[in-house]
Amino acid sequence: MSGWNVIVIGGGHAGLEAAWAAAKFSRVGLLVGNPATVGRMPCNPAVGGPGKSQLVFEIQALGGLMGRLADDTAIHTRVLNASKGPAVQSLRVQNERDAYAEHAQEVIFGQPEIDILRGEAADLEPDGRGGWLVVTTDGRRLPCRSVVIAAGTFMRAVTWYGRQSRAEGRQGEPPSRFLSAPLERAGHKLKRFKTGTPPRVRADSVNFAELLEIPADPQPRGFTGTPGPRAQESPTWQTHTTPQTHELIHENLSESPMFSGDIEGKGPRYCPSIEDKVVRFAHHDRHLLFVEPDGIQTSEVYLQGFSSSLPPYLQDQLVRTLPGFERAVVQRYAYAVEYDVVDATELTLNLESRLLPGVFTAGQLNGTSGYEEAAAQGLVAGTAAARRALGLDTATIGRETGYIGVLLDDLVFKSSDEPYRMMTSRVEHRLLVRQDNADERMTPLGQRLGLVSDEQEAKVRAKYGRVTEAMRSLAAQRANGQTGDAWLRRPEFHLADVEALGLSLPATLDAAEREAVEIRVKYAGYIERARQQLGAEARARGTRLDGLDYAVVPALSNEAREKLGQRRPETLEQAARISGVRHADIGALLVHLKKQGVSRET
């Protein structure tokens, strides 16, 4: 083999999407330590949830893999926040853990443009012609035009079980020992982050009768539009901590490497360990825990919300304080893992290193947490790497375009001092970038970039043509003196209620199209206001801020006032990119400038 246009290092969720996207352009090498671990779900066996399902719908619309894998191996689906508006409704799909990895391997190994390369990356060397050599520990020098590093939590990784540590990445797998060095040599500033997983408990040792059962939705949903064949096959359950749990934790905090100071890496604020929860929220006498099966004929259940770095003997005792777990047998103990991450401010919006042109990084290596965030970055990096290798131009995804754009913008311009998790609250215009319209927003971009076929893009265009025509039809029909769209805007009305009045919609509309009609009609006023606000913000980006006294601006948060005073941005756009400056702070600046009546537009 004379070389590859792209070599992807790592076979987790970021590496999968990077290799899949890059293979749509040319030949790809996927370098992994053990092919049997490709696509593994090391944490919770689920995809989606608030802020995350929106990412998966966008990945699907861009031709990615994650939504397809999740639907094909789904055993439980639920729409979260179903009683709230469409901007925050989020699909969550529980998966059969082993089947997910097996299916991922079938797809990736069956792609003729992807070569599976087994080994550990030891170094990166420029080839003198604008490309790279990936040097392996056994001495091979693998040539390529672009590299995507998707090493997850493996970079100089150390796992902790209590105050005992060992060098490994996850579940006994060896760490990536040498790949941090070429990044540091180039000038990248690496940080240490920490994450962890809960214990896995033998299912036959749990008294499920004592748990609160959560059934799957009666009408299953899917990321691809077609729910998997077993999407309603399993419930999930809830239990909770008890005063005995909390007492045991407080008595043994000295055994936690996080509280004893052994772990230096910063952990995720929005997914803390159980010992961190008990200490930080001491006023709560219980914490909800979600019991999730690893499969249909499962041998294990996953205790979502109970991650820990306490030693195994204490985990045995702690788990048995939970209702339904009095006789529990821990099959795999919880652990914390500490690892190197890149400072994402040293990357472009397409995740290319500013210090090593042609080298891209994706996933938890960039300081994020979660499968979905990793997969989104992998798709972006793999696409950009392949197009760069072929001399093609590329495009960046703006934060106004969707959740992927917000993720990239936050990472590159604001960075994070802890593992970054996508949430709906991070997205300013979330009513415009819902999970239900991801295909409308993203598929045309995917087609322009070469990720999505012309045929698929035409199908999406035709779908929204039918939606628009149905909305016009509703507005043209009347019942009892009111138009159909006016009836539908009533809070208690749905399409079926409108049709019961004798108004009709085209019979060709499928369920997704009917949902699109209902959302667009019901929220038309809010959507239009959001569009106007987006336009106003776009026009205001160049507004000058030089000489502005932030101390006299009302409604600025204290953090924003401090950061703006330190950084002294020249324009409103620069101010919006400063970590700690929220969307509400930008609004406060705009209001203040308008009241001043001074034109500051560039």
Image: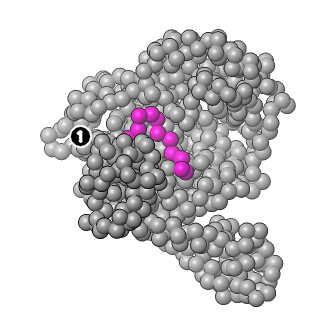
**Three-letter amino acid code at the position of disc 1:** Leu
* Mark 1 element type: loop
Q: On the image, which quarter does residue 366 sit in?
A: top left
Looking at the image, residue 484 sits to the left or right of residue 554; the answer is right
Count of numbered circles in the view: 1
Q: Residue at x 52, y 34 (%)?
A: 269
516 in magenta: no
Q: Is residue 165 above or below residue 465?
A: above
Nearer the observer, 351 or 18:
351
- Quick one: quadrant of the N terminus? top left
Q: Residue at x 78, y 45 (%)?
A: 215
Nearer the observer, 437 or 15:
437
Q: Is residue 480 above or below residue 215?
A: below
**Could you tell me residue 61's position as x and y percent?**
50, 59
| Mark 1 lies on residue | 356
Q: Is residue 149 above or below residue 554?
A: above
- Quick one: quadrant of the C terminus? bottom left
**Could you tell me residue 255's position as x and y percent?**
56, 11
Q: Is residue 233 above or below residue 266?
A: below
Residue stretch in magenta: 413-425
Nearer the observer, 57 or 493:
493
Q: Residue at x 42, y 21 (%)?
A: 264
Residue 88 showing in the rendered view:
yes
**Could you tell me residue 396's position as x and y percent?**
35, 57
Q: Residue at x 51, y 45 (%)?
A: 422
